[in-house]
Image (tube, rainbow, N blue to C red):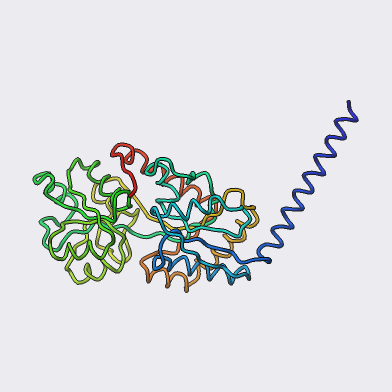
């Protein structure tokens, strides 16, 4: 019996050694034999950050990185495609709150499991959401807004980028927490929302704090009520956070990079190291800021927690209001 156990132990040790050697060898060879594909699960024109990150990765690992747009179903088609690819480090995907977390609850029958089917390599950005009102809306802060809406139930309108979008869910959460009733209106993009606010046919919006809003806020043709982040936006130092204004909600949209589950840890580590160095550079900080984003690198473990926390943040609101992504 002792001889048998000894033989088994030797066999297991040999197997483990071969596995470790193979893994180390694989990590040493990657990515020398073929290009890396970074799938961006949205249409061309929305891939500015993806292309910055791809260029940095290409320089850092010495291999071509191709950005491939695979739009559809709010990002679910491209993200699901990557979930099914070989976990060899040659197919990556940009990650955003919807397809990487919240579709778990807003898309019944989704063909992949957003939180479980990926290695979370790195978060590369965060950005601010802002609650904005038309110039002549009869409220200048959150408490006045809530009081006005309570006096005019279902008469105040708020725009967003579609059911299940970040703006839509924040608006729903604000209504739930404040006990108010706002008429939510879906649009296909921020420019149309801003146009209707400028013409006074729309009262409010919760949207990304980007160029479409900043220039009008600076001109005084739109007025910010609150930002939804944990701290005030640098560009709006006098605008309180929603939490400062009285509602305990912090919601920060983010972007990141994922790979199919089972991608070798050494590859994940290498990509994270390369992109962390880039994201801390002045060049990245400046170029991300142009698009209204903050370059914000994390470890793989930190990014995994971001994704897990994201799903948990919205789970109850999604269930309570039966939110289904468009």
- Total labels drawn: 0
Residue at (12, 58) in percent of width and height:
137
Q: Quadrant of residue 229?
A: bottom left
Q: Quadrant of residue 178?
A: top left
Along the line of sight, the residue nearer the viewer: 39 or 17? 39
Q: Is residue 301 above or below residue 5?
A: below
263 sits left or right of 208 in the view: right
Query: Is residue 326 among what the camera can see?
Result: yes
Along the line of sight, the residue nearer the viewer: 120 or 306? 120
Along the line of sight, the residue nearer the viewer: 232 or 169? 169
Residue 131, horizontal then vertical, whole percent: 24, 56
Q: Quadrant of residue 45?
A: bottom left
Q: Quadrant of the N terminus?
A: top right
Residue 17, horizontal then vertical, whole percent: 79, 47
64 sits left or right of 243 in the view: right
Q: Residue furthest top?
A: 1
Q: Residue furthest right?
A: 3
207 sits left or right of 139 in the view: right
Residue at (22, 44) in percent of width and height:
175
58 sits left or right of 148 in the view: right
Residue 154, horizontal then vertical, whole percent: 13, 45
Query: Is residue 243 among what the camera can see?
Result: no
Residue at (32, 48) in percent of width and height:
164
Q: Is residue 96 above or below residue 61?
A: above
Residue at (30, 39) in percent of width and height:
322
Residue 244, horizontal then vertical, whole percent: 27, 51
């Amino acid at each position: 019996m002792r001889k048998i156990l000894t033989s088994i132990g030797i066999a297991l040790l040999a197997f483990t050694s071969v596995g470790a050697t193979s893994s180390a060898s694989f990590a040493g060879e990657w990515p020398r034999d073929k290009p890396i594909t970074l799938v961006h699960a949205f249409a061309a024109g929305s891939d500015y950050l993806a292309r910055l990150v791809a260029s940095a990765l290409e320089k850092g690992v010495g291999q071509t990185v191709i950005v491939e747009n695979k739009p559809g179903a709010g990002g679910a088609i491209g993200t699901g495609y990557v979930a099914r690819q070989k976990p060899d480090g040659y197919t990556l995907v940009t990650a955003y709150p919807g397809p990487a977390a919240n579709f778990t609850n807003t898309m019944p029958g989704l063909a992949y499991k957003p939180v479980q089917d990926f290695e979370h390599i790195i978060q590369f950005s965060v950005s601010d959401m802002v609650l904005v009102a038309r110039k002549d809306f009869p409220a200048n802060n959150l408490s006045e807004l809530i009081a006005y809406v309570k006096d005019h139930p279902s008469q105040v309108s708020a725009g967003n980028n579609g059911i299940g979008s970040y703006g839509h869910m924040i608006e729903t959460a604000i209504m739930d927490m404040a006990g108010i009733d706002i008429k939510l209106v879906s649009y296909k993009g921020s420019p149309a929302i801003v146009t209707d606010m400028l013409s006074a046919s729309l009262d409010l919006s919760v949207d990304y704090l980007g160029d479409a809003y900043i220039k009008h806020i600076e001109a005084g043709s739109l007025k910010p009520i609150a930002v939804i982040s944990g701290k005030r936006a640098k560009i709006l130092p006098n605008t309180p956070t929603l939490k400062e204004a009285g509602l305990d909600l912090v919601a920060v949209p983010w972007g990141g990079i994922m790979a199919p589950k089972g991608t070798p840890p050494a590859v994940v580590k290498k990509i994270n190291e390369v992109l962390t160095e880039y994201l801390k550079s002045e060049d990245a900080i400046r170029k991300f800021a142009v698009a209204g984003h903050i370059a914000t690198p994390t470890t793989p473990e930190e990014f995994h927690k971001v994704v897990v926390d994201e799903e948990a943040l919205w789970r109850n609101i999604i269930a309570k209001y039966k939110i289904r992504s468009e």
